[in-house]
Image (cartoon, rainbow, N blue to C red):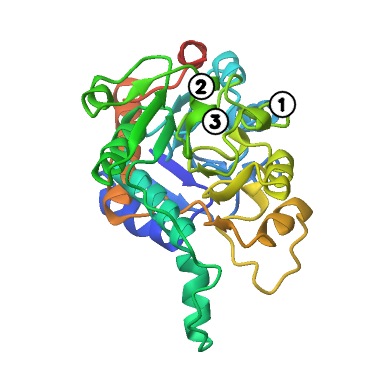
Amino acid sequence: MKVTVFSTKPYDRLFLDRAAARGVELRYSESRLSLDTAALAEGSEAVCAFVNDELSRPVMERLAQLGVRLVALRSAGFNNVDLEAAAEIGIAVARVPAYSPHAVAEHTMAIILSLNRKIHRAYNRVREGNFALDGLLGFDLNGKRMGIVGTGKIGAVLAKIAAGFGCRLLGHDIRPNPECEALGMRYVEREELFRQSDILSLNCPLTPETRHMISADTLPLLKPGVMLINTSRGAVIDAHAAIAGLKDGTIGSLGLDVYEEEADLFFEDLSNEVLRDDVFARLLTFPNVLITGHQAFFTREALDAIAETTIGNIVSFRDSGKPLHAVTVDYLAAKT
């Protein structure tokens, strides 16, 4: 079975080659999947796509014309896929439902610690011979209320880490997680969680309900000076609203590993180019903002798991016509 792998980086090739099964031929392309690049999949029965690849209806139709029958996502998120179009056209969609929740949860805590203790600023100061402490004041995490929106695998691991720091846990999810409740997490409505959280971490999938969860309308609900962290999906936060919140002090600090318009930014070296995204450029001007380039998942353990599950989906589809971890329209409806 021939598979065209889009948005390939050297580490993708390394881990996928290591996991590749006999009878699966992987053809790598550095190009991001779009209507313009879909032709690269000619001759393949499957494509392997990542979070910023475009899988809209026109792209799906083009892939079907080329003979593609499977889209194997090497990610947990699938908000970039038109699932209705895939079902109508007859293309199966698979994903990696879980890889390493520890990777994302630990990165989330790393952002929290760095923002709180100004590690990113202190690092630059020391390199320049500036050892002054003014402007580096933080706070004890012990006793602070941490609100977690989305207490699935990642949120539950983050809750355990936060409990180890002595944080008081608040949670919001459509279904309470017994593991989190055992840690003392109190589940509340979203508005109450917003009002009480000193630290607010968003660890939920992107659905119509969670899109722009942080917006101009919800900013007034946040506890003044809240530390806001997003390691889930970029569109959970309206970046324009975040800027407004930073300017008036509603948001005391902001940590992002994802960004709504990241497709043209993240995973590429743009250091020699002019940054054309004015909103993103504005975010970078705030001293109390820390942004990483969608790297929360990026550990050896996670990449191993992603590769193994992706190949497993492909082999299962080849042998049975069904991937191991299919994503359907019914699944999306259940999540929303």
Q: Position of residue 269 (x, y in %)?
A: 59, 67
For marks 2 and 3, the one nearer the N-term is 3
Q: Residues within 10 Å of mark 2 (few under 14, many from 20)?
A: some
Q: CA distance from mark 3 to mark 1?
A: 45 Å
> SS for tag 2?
helix
Residue 29 place in picture, x, y as percent: 53, 54
Residue at label 1?
217
Q: Earlier in the sequence, mark 2 or mark 1?
A: 2
Label 3 vs label 1, nearer the camera: 1
Residue 113: quarter of image: bottom left
Callout 3: SS: loop
Name the residue at 27% across, 39% down.
Answer: 163
Q: CA distance from mark 2 to mark 1?
A: 15 Å
Q: Residue at x 69, y 74 (%)?
A: 272
Q: Residue furthest bottom?
A: 129
- Determine which residue is flagged by label 2: 192
Disc 2 + disc 3, Cβ < 8 Å = no
Does residue 5 appear to the left or right of 236 in the view shown?
A: left
SS under mark 1: loop
N-term-proximal mark, 3 vs 1: 3
Q: Amino acid at mark 1?
A: Asp
Residue assigned mark 3? 67
Q: Is residue 175 left or right of residue 161?
A: right
Q: Quick check: can you spot residue 98?
A: no
Relative to 331, is 300 above or below?
Answer: below
Image disc number at residue 300: none
The type of residue carrying mark 2 is Glu
Choose between 201 and 168: the one closer to the eye: 168
Q: Name the image quarter holding residue 18.
A: bottom left
Other residues around mark 3 within 10 Å, as few (<14) / some (14–19) / many (≥20):
some
